[in-house]
Image (spheres, rainbow, N blue to C red):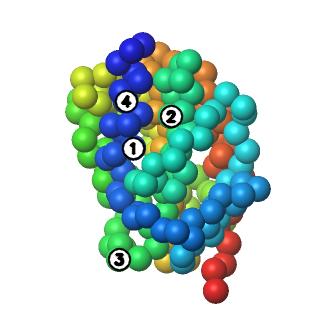
Amino acid sequence: MGALRHVLPLLLLLAPAVGCHRRVRFEDQVFSKPGVRYRVGELPSVWERVRLSHNDLAWYTEETGHALSVNSTCRKHEDAPLDVLTRHLLMGFTERLEVEQQKVVVDEREALRSRYRAKLDGVPVELLFLVLKKDACIYDFTYVAPLGRFEERLPGFESLVRGFHAESVS
């Protein structure tokens, strides 16, 4: 269990940097930063929000070692297919094994939902990624669970995604 406490910082450091903006806000389940605004679903109280400059939003459950993150990229990104964007999220993980991959609809857009088993810094984890493109932005959701404990906090991930809605930014 002690090694899992090191997984969250390592995982979140691997995410693409979005920079630090002074106008970043998260209120009433709505995240906004220059050029992007979106809503996410509510999480159960077991999830503790952590602030990291490399993600729009991130949460962690210290007692179980689960982690969630959401990120958006709306400028200077290539128009790559969803599977290529998902593979970018796997950078830094070793011994990757794809368990399942399927297309789903999120916020009226096709998204790719991918489940993996992998290792991060030698620690085995189970991963769930959801990637979608909407209105010139890429949104990615990441769920990390200790090996064998994937189902425990999965409802939090499902709630977060179910409540997702990208809003127009003027």
Looking at marks 1 and 3 on the same chain, the residue that comes earlier in the sequence is marked by 1
* Residue that carries the numbered disc 1 in the rendered image: 12
Residue at (48%, 68%) from the top-left corner? 21
Amino acid at dot 3: Lys
CA distance for labels 2 and 3: 27 Å
State the quadrant of the C terminus.
bottom right
| Most foreground residue, 103 or 128 | 128
Give left or right: position of 68 versus 38. Answer: left
Is residue 62 visible to us here?
A: yes
CA distance for labels 2 and 1: 9 Å
CA distance for labels 2 and 4: 9 Å
The secondary element bearing badge 2 is classed as strand
Q: Residues within 10 Å of mark 4 (few under 14, many from 20)?
A: many
Q: Position of residue 115 (x, y in %)?
A: 44, 37
Q: Residues within 10 Å of mark 1 (few under 14, many from 20)?
A: some
The secondary element bearing badge 1 is classed as helix
| Most foreground residue, 159 or 79 | 159
Mark seen at residue 76: 3
Whether tag 2 and tag 1 are in contact, CB under 8 A, the answer is yes
Q: How many marks?
A: 4
Residue at (31%, 22%) from the top-left corner? 123
